[in-house]
Amino acid sequence: MIKITANNPDRKSWIEVNEESDFPIQNLPFGIFSTAKKGKRVGVALGDSVIDVYQLAKEGYLDEGIDVEAYNRTFLNDFMAYGKEMTRKVRNRIADIFDAENGELRDISADVAKIVHEKVECTMHLPVQVGDYTDFYSSKEHATNVGTMFRDPDNALLPNWLHIPVGYHGRSSSIVVSGTSIHRPKGQQKPDEEKPPVFGPCKLLDFELEMAFVTHNGNAMGDQIPVDQSDNHIFGMCLFNDWSARDIQKWEYVPLGPFLAKSFASSISPWIVTLDALEPFRCDGPPQNPEPLPYLKQSGKNNFDIELEVGITPPGSEETIVTNSNFKYMYWSMAQQLAHHSVNGCNIRCGDMMASGTISGPDRASYGSMLEISWKGTNPIEMKDGSQRKFIQDGDTVTMRGCSRVNGVKIGFGEVKTEVLPAK
Ligand code: MN
């Protein structure tokens, strides 16, 4: 495998990048954008600019062996299908082209005008055509909180939890990009234990603070992805808001798990930050005790230090940050999740999306859902405008952000921002 050269912290770009930008030249995340004159295509974010990668390839700046037309697509899948080594080469090359020391594009203003757009001219789209979406449940703090609330504080974690990266198959058709409003879902609820169920708009609408990874090609059916090779099958990550209808969930989830309480919508950020860009932010995960079975056993640093926050903006009001968490709290790593997912011979395909599960930290200020922050609605949180929230109300906008920082380099994810409209 070739080396990652794009991450050099000393590198500067000839494109001006604000110090607090999520997208310095060390990041270079991939997405799908369009402009008034250009249809959907592959782009890369750099500061407040978007690089038209299709145009860059057409003008002859890329020669990594990827078909130029693979960038002229409405999703990243055809690009991701080239695999880790090829996509790494392209990111390395883009870092070189936009390096302050390199004049090959910088000095040809006619090409720059065709290739570099201001972010404000660009519309971002769903970056990946998601084949299968899987949601894990890998934060010990979250699983413990939920188990405490709904089952038994003394046995909050079910017996399988410390042995298996627990997950379920979600719904990919309703994954939408940041900026897409969603409607409050309707469904069956059973607010009164003694009475029959009722039907109507969900009353306990919640966000789940998660991150997701997307895959290159995986394994043939019947084969498995070994845990020490999992990272080679992961292209990158995005922010993931796994919308949840708690009242619908509570009534429907036994015995087969979440269904309509989750399948109505999940929202993602538009830029896929490559796993390569996140290499400097690797850190240790929580100690795993009992020791995982051999197929899940890992060495080295397999978690990532990514600061996360969630804000709620009531209609016509200012935002209140309701939680600050971190991806490093995950008990099971992405590599373990992928190894587990494929250990039975299930074939992973390019463009599959796997979400972490709600990422909760150790205390209320770091919980990843309103269910936990308001403790089932018993402990509302104060908004800056004086109102209170137990769950999400119509007209509220929920925004998630994330970034990693080390050695003066900030690698950000942008945001996933969603307004909640009334039930249809
Ligand atoms: Mn979830």
Image (cartoon, grey):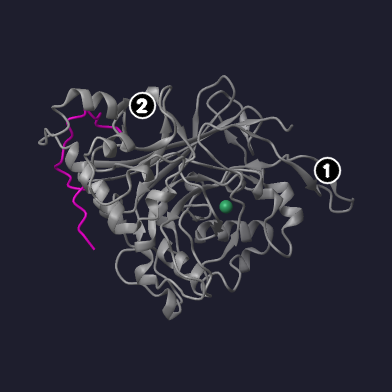
| Quarter of the image where the N terminus is located | bottom left
Q: Which residues are magenta?
A: 1-21
Name the dominant secondary structure of the magenta segment.
Answer: loop
Q: Quadrant of residue 28?
A: top left
In this view of the protein, can residue 291 be seen by the observer?
Answer: no
Question: Which residue is labeled 1 in the image?
Answer: 199
Name the spot of residue 254 as percent of width and height, x first.
Answer: 74, 62
Reading the chain from its start, which is encountered first: label 2 or label 1?
2
Residue pictured at 55% horizontal, 21% vertical: 317
Q: Nearer the viewer, mark 2 or mark 1?
A: 2
* Residue that extends furthest to the right in the rendered view of this protein: 195
Name the amino acid, label 2.
Lys
Q: Amino acid at mark 1?
A: Phe
Q: Residue at x 68, y 58 (%)?
A: 150
**Could you say where residue 60 lies in the image, as x and y percent from the top left?**
22, 39
Indicate whether residue 12 is drawn in magenta: yes
- Provide the secondary structure element on which disc 2 rests: helix
Where does residue 174 sit, x and y in percent of width and height?
61, 44
**Label 2: which residue?**
119
Q: Residue furthest bottom?
A: 294
Side of 5 where 351 appears, left or right: right
User: On the picture, is 87 further left or further right than 202?
Assistant: left
Task: Please state which of residues 278 and 328 is positioned toward the viewer in this rendering.
Answer: 278
Residue drawn at 22 percent across, 27 percent down? 111
